[in-house]
Amino acid sequence: MSAIRRQSIISSIVIYLGFAVGMLNVYFFTKDGLFTPAQYGLTKIFMDISVMIGALAGFSMPSFIFKFHPYYFYHLPPQKNDMVTWALLLSIIGFILVATGGWVFKDLVIRKFGANSPELVTYYNWVFPMGFGVVLFATLEAYGWAVHKSVFTNFLKEILWRVIVLFLILLFIIHIISGFDGFIKLYALAFPIIAFVLLFYLVFTNRIHFTLKTSKVTRRHFKKILAFCVFSYSGSIVFTLSQIFDSLVIAAVLEDGLSKAGIFGLAQIMTSIIQAPQRGIVAASIAHLARAWKDKDIPTIQRIYERSSINLLLFAVGIFALIVLNYKDAITTFGLRADYLAGFTAFIFLGLTKVVDLGTGVNPQIIATSNYWRFDLFSGILLVIIMLPLTYILTKQYDILGPAIASLISISIYNLIRIAFLWYKYKLQPFTSASLYTILIAVFCFVVSYFAFINMEGMMALILRSTLFMGLYGIIVIYFKLSPDIEPVWNTIRKRLTK
């Protein structure tokens, strides 16, 4: 567990540094007088479509790597390990097929988005270079996680990519990039850059080897690999669609769709801060889960499940409460466009969705690396069956609040089903009494911090509210030792501070 804890902490630090840069980018995107909400919304839609391209073109190669890397690693010398070669080759072939389909169905995109989001139609072709970067990076990232290089892959995705975007924003502000036309085209090339950086790194550090000779592991497990990838591919498409469908619906059906997608996008960015620790814990734990399933080590899986749940819940409810305390005041204080205040209520529901999702721990990774990985698809299909029509109906009825409500309802049902499945099959469950105490403590700290400075506004109010909440929440959590990982981390911090 110490290896997972160490990698999770380092990855979380890297991710939060990335978010610091990302929030600076968001500040420039949303500040009055620089970018319009429609332009910011277009960058969000670009990323959403690119992620969908990644799911369609990737043929579930990241999941294949997660699941089967231990078999290749323990039974083949590095020079004969053909896993990553086939994964990359299939991903590239998949992208070519998806790009061809995108060209063929371009008229359909024009019909669906032309009226409410004409800018997307104008720059439609530039989505595909960005999509290629997402496809390539996703496969290499999975391999990086498998060989315990999650910290570096997180650095590229969370920091370097955002630094590149920040650099482009600054060039736009000082008019070296002439207009939004030049900016969005260069923005589309940022993700391919980090993908090639990761490729060069893995080659340079001798972590990756290429061979077109089919290995004995591939031959022996081919039918199992094929069946797994077919099911996992379907599941990844279903899950990805559930993640991006809200923004696409907003852009397609609401008047001035890209502007509203931008407002909704800011609320989503705030919720992604809540989700940040999940990436580090998933990256650090997935290789250990795969090995534990291989060794039939259920107690280790239970420990990872339980600790991931309480650690992620501690982060999630704390960060969610902190953002709720300051959301509106921060928009006004930092001079962002007043339009973005309309996204506050949507953020409440989106934030609660992330709390539910993180609080259930790494159940997706546990299922995906188990012998019941097919259930990942079945539960994902159910999620889409609930979420897609609900999102469409509620968006037309409640504007940008609609998809946020739909997300909370569908993700809650989705996670409840997965928790019940793991309990039924393996008697695995993520919750302890500390889970309830965490929520109660967060509510208490929120109420105290809110009413202590209820009549204050501006920068001083932001600082005082945040300081009170973080101090009170942190002290109570540490005192009651709500997570087994708190004491060793806290002791390490104290030792370094007292040196």
Image: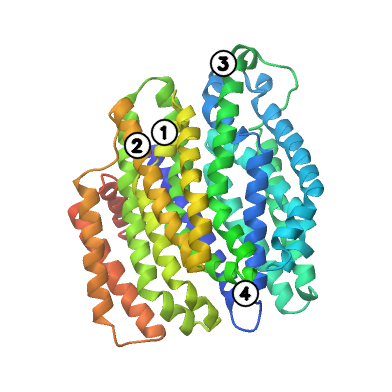
> Seen in the image, is 352 located left or right of residue 82?
left
Instruction: Find disc 1 in the rendering and name its residue.
Output: 366
Name the front one of labels 2 and 3: 2
Task: Answer with mark 4 or mark 1, whichever residue precedes in sequence.
Answer: 4
Q: Secondary structure at mark 1?
A: helix
Task: Answer with mark 2 or mark 3, whichever residue precedes in sequence.
Answer: 3
x and y, in percent, of residue 337 in the image: 56, 81
x and y, in percent, of residue 161 in the image: 64, 57
Give how far apart the Cα atoms at labels 3 and 1 are: 23 Å
Instruction: Find disc 3 in the rendering and name its residue.
Output: 75
Dot label at residue 37? 4
Task: Answer with mark 4 or mark 3, whichever residue precedes in sequence.
Answer: 4
Would you say the residues marked 1 and 2 are in contact, meaning their CB atoms lie under 8 Å apart?
Answer: yes
> Seen in the image, is 304 located left or right of residue 55?
left
Name the front one of labels 4 and 1: 4
Instruction: Find disc 2 in the rendering and name its residue.
Output: 304
Name the front one of labels 1 and 2: 1
Q: Amino acid at mark 3?
A: His
x and y, in percent, of residue 70 in the image: 52, 24
Q: Is residue 447 above or below residue 408?
A: below
Give how far apart the Cα atoms at labels 4 and 2 are: 41 Å
